[in-house]
């Protein structure tokens, strides 16, 4: 791509800083002398608090303060945390019970914060927590995702938080009744813990009635607004900053109890207060992901064309409404409900239930993996039941290139795509023709080989608007202020590279500033694969305004009308003038003339429409039937991300996403016992993928530039995960099918696969 990024694979500039230990994370930047916060958490999943005596803890060595919910209320705080509420099918709102910042009267999950101790050292705070007298009258724990059981919230009878539907239920039912054949599959999507490399943390400090909260989030403006609400402050009295952030995965995009409590503690003691989560604490208190079951159904005509698609899901919302949970389980799921297929009628119904588990926000992929996983598992099952090649069944039902722009049954309009082209490309890249020979060779060694295909589509989500501010500094460098927040994606490199491509300013003279609500007036943060497309769209608007201003200034300097001056992405030029200044040179000329208004430019821009990244994943697994061990042997990806700025970083994003998908498919699973105790609360019990669990991941870009934005970009942040789960699961199902196994659900741990094989043998006898 010429004008909009030169598509060069440049190495990330921030890596030198990270690899040499110069990263500045929230625990690195907490003020010297800051007090330490430790959260006393419930060890009971559900019960009425009958005693909470913190007097001995307050008198403990080094302790400055102990806060309970009553203390927060006495300080005049609004203790209600934000919780999404979506419309039910009958027009009412989903349940919206109070979620207090610290437990009030009752506890509802193991790990719920009950009190916070502020001390000189973390050891003193932890010791003081041992002195808290805390007693609970136990109530039965609600763990299963069904109606009924002990009520968690009076606002949600039978623990049903929401009952939402989308599509044309009557037309879908009619299509199923008229179908030549139907296929159905129950799909289980196991719960996972996000496990960002850097756990959550924060510090807070007050000065002259103004609060500064630094946390390792995915944007600062959501936090700013909620902190202002909690303390009854004008927003200009709140500053939120994000330093370097070691992984987010969506989990860090929302606010949490601890940030408000630490801020109030800092106000009460008059000193900065810091908090950093421990790993088990994070596993207990971070919003989790997935945890839903779905009945998915296809209706086909006699030519194997899909006439209707229907999904009925039950999802776990945890103990409370979290910031986005109801929304994610519905709207985000529905955006790719019909995937890349030409389906005219669909119906999606989602029922959400409260359980005595930590709040769930469906993150580490934000809704798209769930939708594609269900769809592509069903497509694989349909091919088997119809006796059709799974690749061919997809080709039959693909939206064809001449059908774009295509309005899906869910109301989304897909701008462009060439799905069959990508499928043909991946057949070659994955050596589809050689699969049978590999399978036969493994069979001779007593091993089972399976191949799984997934064709995914996702969309850019979140605020389509973003801002960018460019300032020319006295030392000849340039600063670009952005409204998104990197948590590992390489934004510093990408944004500098893109600005350099548009202006000719050397990338090594461009500094990227993010994550400070005082420096950037507004921003949408990072999430939903929005960052690069929305941010660079704003950069284009700023560069255009900057070019126009510089051109007007140069009209006098060059002695020609502004209309005759052009900019070729490197220099300004005009017939009849021997001046050909660069952007940096024009800025210096303006500075010398006292034209300081020309040294700072800020514009906001809004994407006119969504774009839709899509692509194909092919996984091959080998299973040892004696042990049940699943090995991911080969993995191939062909993606359409539209135009790329830095292909190497896009490939890195895909590799990371595939690793997440493989982890969930083969190893990861959250387990609670009947009393609501988390049994997988450390890395001794919760398995994460390691380098040895992954094969070489082949990545190929097959771009079909988007028509929804001038840059032709499509986003790529979550694509690896979106495709990986179904590709792996379909590969395992393929390997087990001939062994009589007809239902294989994640995670494919050795014990589970071994059991499936033995059950299949028994069923076949």
Image (cartoon, rainbow, N blue to C red):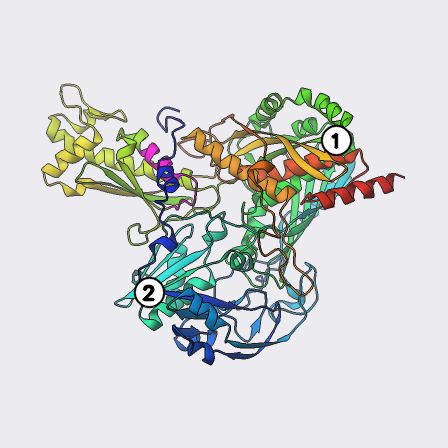
Q: Which residue is mark 1?
A: 447
Q: Which residue is mark 2?
A: 272
Mark 2 Cα-neighbour bin, 10 Å: few <14, some 14–19, many ≥20: many
Query: Is label 2 in a helix, a strand or a loop?
Result: loop
Instruction: Give the percent coordinates (x, y) of residue 229.
Output: 39, 65
Q: Which residues are magenta?
A: 484-499
Side of 340 where 534 appears, left or right: left
**Picture quadrant of residue 763:** top right
Question: Residue 223 colored magenta?
Answer: no
Q: Is residue 602 above or below residue 321?
A: above
Q: Is residue 612 visible?
A: no
Residues at marks 2 and 1, CA–CA distance in whole angstroms: 60 Å
**Which of the two discs, 2 and 1, labels the residue nearer the N terminus?**
2
Instruction: Give the percent coordinates (x, y) of residue 670.
Output: 63, 53
Q: Which quadrant is the C terminus positioned in?
A: top right
Q: Is residue 671 above or below residue 472?
A: below
Side of 494 where 574 appears, left or right: left
Q: Is residue 567 visible?
A: yes
Instruction: Give the percent coordinates (x, y) of residue 453.
Output: 65, 32
**Picture quadrant of residue 723:** top right
Question: Residue 485 colored magenta?
Answer: yes
């Amino acid at each position: 791509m010429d004008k909009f990024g030169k598509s060069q694979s440049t190495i990330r500039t921030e890596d030198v800083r990270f690899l040499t230990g110069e990263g500045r994370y929230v625990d690195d930047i907490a003020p010297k002398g800051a007090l330490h916060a430790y959260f006393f958490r419930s060890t009971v999943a559900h019960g009425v608090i009958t005693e909470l005596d913190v007097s001995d803890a307050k008198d403990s060595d080094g302790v400055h303060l102990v806060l309970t919910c009553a203390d927060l209320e006495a300080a005049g705080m609004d203790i209600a945390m934000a919780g999404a509420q979506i419309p039910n099918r009958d027009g009412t709102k989903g349940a919206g019970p109070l979620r207090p910042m610290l437990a009030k009267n009752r506890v509802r999950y193991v790990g719920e914060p009950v009190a916070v101790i502020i001390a000189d050292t973390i050891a003193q705070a932890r010791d003081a927590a041992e002195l808290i007298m805390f007693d609970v009258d136990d109530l039965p724990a609600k763990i299963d995702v069904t109606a009924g059981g002990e009520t968690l919230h009076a606002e949600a009878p039978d623990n049903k938080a929401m009952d939402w539907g989308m599509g044309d239920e009557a037309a879908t039912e009619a299509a199923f009744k008229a179908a030549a054949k139907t296929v159905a599959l129950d799909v289980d999507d196991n719960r996972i813990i996000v496990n960002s490399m850097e756990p959550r943390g924060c510090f807070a400090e007050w000065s002259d009635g103004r609060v500064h909260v630094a946390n390792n989030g995915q944007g600062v403006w959501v936090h700013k607004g909620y902190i202002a609400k909690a303390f009854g402050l004008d927003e200009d009295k709140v500053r939120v900053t994000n330093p370097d952030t070691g992984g987010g995965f969506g989990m860090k995009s929302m606010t949490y109890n601890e940030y408000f409590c630490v801020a109030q503690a800092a106000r009460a003691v008059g000193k900065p207060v810091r908090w950093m989560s421990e790993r088990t604490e994070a596993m207990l208190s971070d919003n989790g992901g997935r945890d839903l079951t779905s009945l998915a159904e296809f209706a086909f005509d006699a030519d194997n064309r899909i006439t209707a698609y229907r999904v009925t899901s039950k999802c776990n919302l945890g103990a409370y409404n979290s910031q986005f949970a109801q929304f994610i389980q519905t709207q985000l799921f529905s955006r790719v409900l019909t995937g890349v297929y030409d389906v005219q009628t669909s119906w999606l119904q989602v029922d959400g239930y409260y359980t005595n588990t930590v709040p769930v926000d469906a993150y580490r992929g934000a809704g798209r993996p769930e939708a594609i996983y269900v769809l592509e598992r069903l497509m694989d099952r349909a091919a088997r039941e119809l006796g059709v090649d799974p690749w061919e069944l997809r080709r039959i039902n693909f939206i064809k290139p001449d059908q774009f722009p295509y309005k899906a049954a869910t109301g989304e309009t897909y701008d462009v795509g060439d799905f069959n082209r990508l499928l043909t490309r991946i057949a070659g890249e994955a050596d589809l023709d050689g699969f049978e020979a590999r399978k036969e060779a493994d069979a001779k060694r007593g091993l089972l080989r399976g191949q799984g295909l997934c064709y995914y589509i996702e969309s850019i989500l979140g605020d389509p608007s973003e801002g960018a501010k460019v300032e020319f500094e006295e030392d000849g460098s340039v600063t670009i202020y952005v409204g998104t927040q990197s948590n590992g994606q390489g934004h510093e490199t990408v944004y500098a590279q893109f600005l350099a491509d548009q202006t000719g300013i050397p990338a090594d003279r461009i500094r990227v500033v993010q994550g400070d609500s005082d420096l950037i007036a507004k921003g949408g943060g990072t999430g939903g694969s929005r960052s690069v497309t929305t941010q660079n769209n704003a950069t284009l608007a700023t560069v255009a305004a900057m070019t126009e201003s510089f051109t007007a200034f140069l009209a006098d300097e060059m002695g020609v009308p502004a209309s005759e001056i052009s900019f070729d992405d490197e220099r300004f030029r005009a017939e009849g003038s021997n001046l050909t200044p660069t952007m940096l040179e024009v800025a210096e000329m303006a500075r010398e003339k006292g034209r300081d208004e020309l040294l700072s430019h800020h514009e906001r821009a809004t994407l006119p429409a969504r774009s839709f990244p899509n692509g194909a994943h092919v996984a091959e697994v080998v299973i040892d039937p004696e042990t049940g061990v699943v090995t991911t042997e080969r993995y191939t990806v062909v993606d359409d991300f539209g135009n790329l700025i830095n292909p190497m970083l896009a490939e890195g994003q895909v590799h990371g996403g595939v690793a997440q998908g493989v982890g969930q498919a083969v190893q990861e699973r959250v387990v609670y016992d009947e009393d609501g105790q988390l049994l997988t609360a450390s890395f001794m019990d919760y398995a994460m993928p390691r380098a040895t669990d992954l094969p070489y991941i082949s990545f190929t870009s097959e771009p079909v530039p988007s028509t929804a934005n001038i840059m032709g970009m499509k986003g790529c942040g979550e694509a690896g995960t979106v495709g990986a789960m179904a590709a792996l699961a379909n590969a395992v199902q393929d390997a087990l099918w001939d062994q009589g196994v007809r239902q294989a659900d994640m995670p494919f741990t050795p014990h589970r696969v071994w059991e499936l094989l033995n059950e299949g043998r028994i069923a076949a006898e």
